[in-house]
Amino acid sequence: LGSIKEMKRKNIESIRTLMSIAVIDGEFLGESWGPVLQCISQLGRLQLITSGLALDEKFLNSSTTSSTTSVTSETNGDTPQVGSGGDGSFFRQPTKAESDRETEESNGRAVLAAVNEILIDKVFSSTVHLSARSMSRFVQQLISVSAAEIAGLSHRGPKRVGLDATMNLSSPAISSDQGPRIFSLQRLVEVADYNMDVRPRLVWAQMWEMMANHFAVIGCHENAMVSMFAIDALRQLSFKFLEKPELTDFSFQQMFLKPFLMIMQDISSRDDTRELILRCVDNMIRSMSHNLRSGWNVFFTILTLSASDPSEKINTLGLAILQRLLDEHLHEVCRISSSEMRKSDDVSQMTALEIHERNTNADDFIGLCNASLAFVPTENRQHLLPIGLSMRALCHTACYSDLIADKKVLPPVSGAQWSDPKLSAFTYSGLSEKESLEMALWRPILEGLAAGVSSTAASNTGGVGCLVQRGSVMTMRAILLRHGHLFSIPQWLAVLEQTILPAIQTAAESDKSAVVKLLSESPSVSSVDFVSEPLQLPPSPDDEGLLKFAEQAQSVDGAPKRPLGSAELLVEASFADLRHGGDGNLSRAYLLAMKDVEGIKTSEQPFPDSWIATTAPIALGMLTDIASEIMLTRGGSGREKIWPVIMGQFSRWTFGDNSWNPSDETEAAWLPCEALVRTGCHELHRFPLKLFEALPRLDKAEANVWASELCEIFVDALKKNVTLEGLIHEELIKSKLMTMNDSADEKKQTNGENGAANNRGNGRVSTPYGDGTTVAHRVDEYDDGKVTKQVTISITELDSGATLYGMPQPDINSEDPVKKPISREKFLDRYIPALKVRCIAAHSIQTSLPSVINVFAAMTGKDAITALLGSLEQSRQTAMNATKDADMALAFQEAMFSEWEDGVEEVEASLGTLGGITNRGGSQMFFLTQEASANRAIIHILSLLFGESGGSSGSGDESNDWGKQQFAEPQLMSRMLDVLDKFLVSDEKEGHLIDPHVWRLSNQRRGKIALYCTSFATTVVMILDMIKNFNEDQFRKQKDSLFPILCKLIRVQSDEVRSLVHDVMMHHVAPYLT
C-alpha cells in the first residue's frame, strides 16, 4: 500500500484477513493497531481515487499551486513528448503521474471488490466492545495515523507510520507532493461518537483527554481548511455530548469543551479559527444552555480571552455573545430553585451536594462577571478595544449587581478566602464568615470597576478623554447608590478601604499630565476651572423620567425584552447623558436618547488624557454621595466608623500624606496638585450642604452632633493647613539662607579668598557679608496668633567690624557633618508651589465656611464656635505675617524668574528694571487673599451670632442659649474696624491703582497694584452691608467708633464703597440730623 504497484491476489487477501483480525481479535492487537489503521487510511485513499473524487490533498493543501506542480513535473522527468503534430496531442505518451493514477485506480477497484466497505466501517464501530486498556491503545494509534496524514506523511506506508515526536502539526504538510489528509481525523470523530454513550464517564474522560489534545493541535493548523474541519468536528461532538444532562458534582462538560479553550489560548491560531470557535460557542449557548453546567466555565473563559484578542472583529463578536446571553439566557445562568431560596440563609439544612452546587453556581456567575470586565481595559496595549465595547461591558456589570441584589444569584456557602483573586470565593478580609461570603459575589465586580477607575489605558473620543475611567466611576457609583443599603457597616469599611480608596488614590498619583504642574496666579482666580464637576444625585428608581428612558430603550429594534434593573437603568441613562453632552439631570435623559445623534457631542477638553481633570471630581464626589445617601441612614455608627474613612480621603487630597515632612529632602511623600486640592475642598463644602438636606431624616440629637462634627472638621482642616504653611515657610527661609551661604563660599573659593581657612579658630563662620566669629546666641519669642514661637538668633562679629544678627551658621572648622544646601532651583521648586497650594487650600476652605455656618450656626455650641474662630484667626495671623516677610516675597519672585532659567544676578537685574518686587505672582497676592477670606469668614460668623436676639437660637435647644450677642459683639467690632482702618491706609497710599482686574494687567503699571484694597474690597463691602442692616439699638451703641471711620471712607477711590457709605449715612446717620 505504500508504493504504487499493481496489487496481486495475495495482497488483496492479506488486506481482507487484516480487516477480519481487527474486527474479531482487536482486543489483542495493542501497538499493532498502527499498521492496521495505516492500511485502512490507504484504503480510504484508494476509494477516493476509484470513485473519481478529488483527493483530500487537492483541496486541503493550501501551499500547492499550479506553478509548483508544473515545476515538480519537469524535475521528475515528466515532460510531455511532442511529435511533429505541433502540440503533440495525438502522439503524446502518458506521464508518470497519469500512469500512477491508472495503477491506483486499478488497485482500488480490485481491493474494494474484495473488501467490503462495511467491513472497514465495522473496524471502527466494533471499538465499543474493546476494553478500556485496548481502547486507549487504539485511540493512541489512530491519533498517530491522523497526525501523519495531517503532516502529509501518509504515503510512506504501514512500516513508516510512526510520527516523529518533534514534528510540528501546526505547520503545512512537510512533503512537497503530498498534502494533508483528514481521513483518520474523520474516523476519530466516528469513534468518539460510537463510544460516547456506551463508555462509563471516567473511561470516556481518559479517552477524550487524548483526543482533545489532538483536536486542539489540529485546530491551530496553518491550513484554514484543516483547522476548521477539526473545529467543526468538535462542534458536532459537543452538541451530541451536551444533549445529556451533567450529573451534579461532575465536570465532564468542562473537560469535553477544553479543546475550544486550548485553541483560543494558542497564539499561533488563525483569526478566522478563533472567530469560528466563538460562533460555535454562540450556537451551543443558544441551543444547549438548558443543559450547561460545568461547561459555562469554559465558555466564560473563552469570552474573556476574546476581549484581549488583537482582532477587533473577535472583540465585537465576544461582547455580542455576552450581550445575547444576558438578554436571552440569563435565567439559565442563574438557576435558583424555590428550595434553594428557602435554604439560602440556613446552611445547616443543605446537603454536601447542595453546598457544592451552590458554590459552583457562584463560581460560574463570577466567571460571567469577569468575562464582561475583561472588556474594560486597565492598561495600554498594542490593539486598543473600541470605546463602545468597554462602555457596554460596564452596563453588564450593573446588570450583575441587580441580579445579586434581587437574590437571583446566591453567594457561596463555604470556602471564603482573600489571598488569591483567581481562586473561588475571593472576598474581603476582616469580616465575619457570613459577611465575607456575601461579599464573594460583590468583590469581583467592585474590584473590576476599581481597576477601570485607575486604568492607564487611553480612551479618548472626539476630544473627550478618560471615558473608560469615567464610565467605571459612574457604574460603581450607580451600583453603590442603588444597592449600598444591602451592605453592613463592616462591609462598607472593607469596600472603601480595600477597593475604592486605593483605586482613586492610585489613579491620582499616576496622573503625569500637565495638570499636576498648573498653578493659579491667585487663590481667588482658578487656572484649573476646566476640571469637571461632580455628578448630580440620581433620581429615585421610580422617577418618571427614568421610566420613560427605560421604555424608550426597550422599544429599539433588537433591544432585550427583559426589564432593566435599577442600577443598570441608572448606568444606561448616565451613559446616554455623557454621550449626548447632557447636564447630568438623568430625569431628562430620555429627551437626549430621542435625538438621532452619533458620537459624543460634548465640547473638547483641554486635557483629555488627565485623570485629575476628567475623573477625579466624579470619583471624590461619589464618596460625598455615599456619605449623604448611605452613611447618614446608619446613624451614629455610620458617623463614627464610615465618616472618618471618607473624611480621610478628603483630607489626603487637600493636604497630602500625613507623613510628609518639609525638612526631609529625601522623602518621596505624595503631595496633591492644585486641581486635587480644590476638588477636596469642594467636597468638604458640598457634604455639609447635603447634610443639611438630610436633616429632616435625622433625629435632633444626631443633627446637633453633626453640627459640632462639622465645626471640628473645619477647625482641624484649618489648623493642619496653618501647621503645614508654617513648616514650609520655615524650611523655605532656612534653605534660602543656606543656599546664599553656599553661593558666597563658592565665590570666595573662586577668588582665592579662602587661603587662610586653616588658621580660623573655633566659632568661625562664613556669611554672605564676610567671615566672622559667633560671640553669643539669644532666644527671642513672638506670638504667632494662638501659638508662641521661639527663634534662636546668633550674634556674629564680622571681620569688617560690623555685627550681624541672624540664624545660627555652621562652624566652618567643625568636623560634624553639615546638611548640604540644596540648589536654588530645587528649593524653589520644592517649597514655593507647596506654599501656593496651601494658600489656595486655606482660601477655599475659608470661602466655603459662610454658607456652611448659615445652616448650622443655630445648632452649634459655644465651644465649637470658639474653636472655629480660633482656627480662622490663626490662619489670618499666619497669612498676615507671611505678607510682611520680605524674604518670602523675594523667594516668590525668584521662583517666577527661575522658570526662565535665570541666575541670581539676572533675577536682581530684572527686579531692578521693574522698580523692585512685583505683585503679579508674588507672595502678597496669595497671602493677602488668604488673610482677606479669613477675615470674611470671621466677620460672617460673628455677624450671625450678633444678629440673633438675646438667647434665641432658633433651634429650640436651650443648651445653645449662651449669650451669643455678648460673645460676638466685641470681637466683631474689633475685626471690622481693623479691616476698615487698614483699607483706608492702603487706599490713601495706593488707591489710584485700584482695578478689579488689575492683577492680570500688572505690566501696565510696572507690576504695582493696590493689593490690599483689591483683596479686601469684597470684605469692606460685606462690612458696610452689615452696618447698614444694624438695627437702631446696635448702631447707636457703636456709633462713636463707626461714625469717624465712615466719614473717612467717603473719600476712597472705590465707587461701590462710597455708594454704600452713602446708604449707611442716609439710613443711620440722617435721622440724628433731623
Image (cartoon, rainbow, N blue to C red):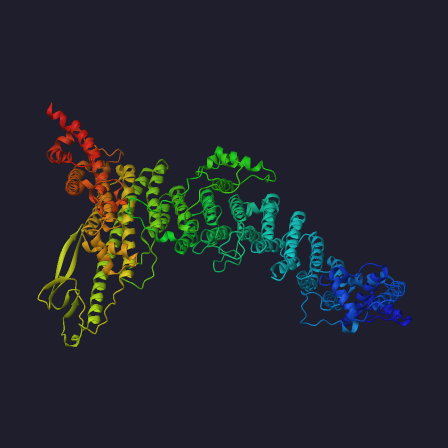
Q: Is residue 1047 above or below residue 161?
A: above
**Residue lying at the far left of the rendered structure:** 801
Horizontal side, residue 6 vs residue 312: left or right: right
Horizontal side, residue 156 vs residue 735: left or right: right
Closer to us: 420 or 877:
877
Closer to us: 496 or 1030:
1030
Horizontal side, residue 372 vs residue 470: left or right: right
Q: Quarter of the image containing the N terminus?
A: bottom right
User: Can the viewer see residue 247 in this picture?
Assistant: no
User: Can the viewer see residue 618 in this picture?
Assistant: yes
The x, y position of residue 19, in whole percent, is 84, 67
Q: Is residue 115 above or below residue 1067?
A: below
The x, y position of residue 538, in whole percent, is 44, 39
Q: Quadrant of residue 128?
A: bottom right
The x, y position of residue 889, in whole percent, is 21, 53
Q: Is residue 623 above or below residue 141?
A: above
The x, y position of residue 610, in whole percent, is 42, 51
**Residue lying at the far bottom of the rendered structure:** 758
Q: Is residue 660 above or below residue 613?
A: below
**Residue lying at the far right of the rendered structure:** 9
Closer to us: 1001 or 825:
1001
Closer to us: 892 or 944:
892
Q: Quarter of the image containing the C terminus?
A: top left
Horizontal side, residue 742 vs residue 402: left or right: left
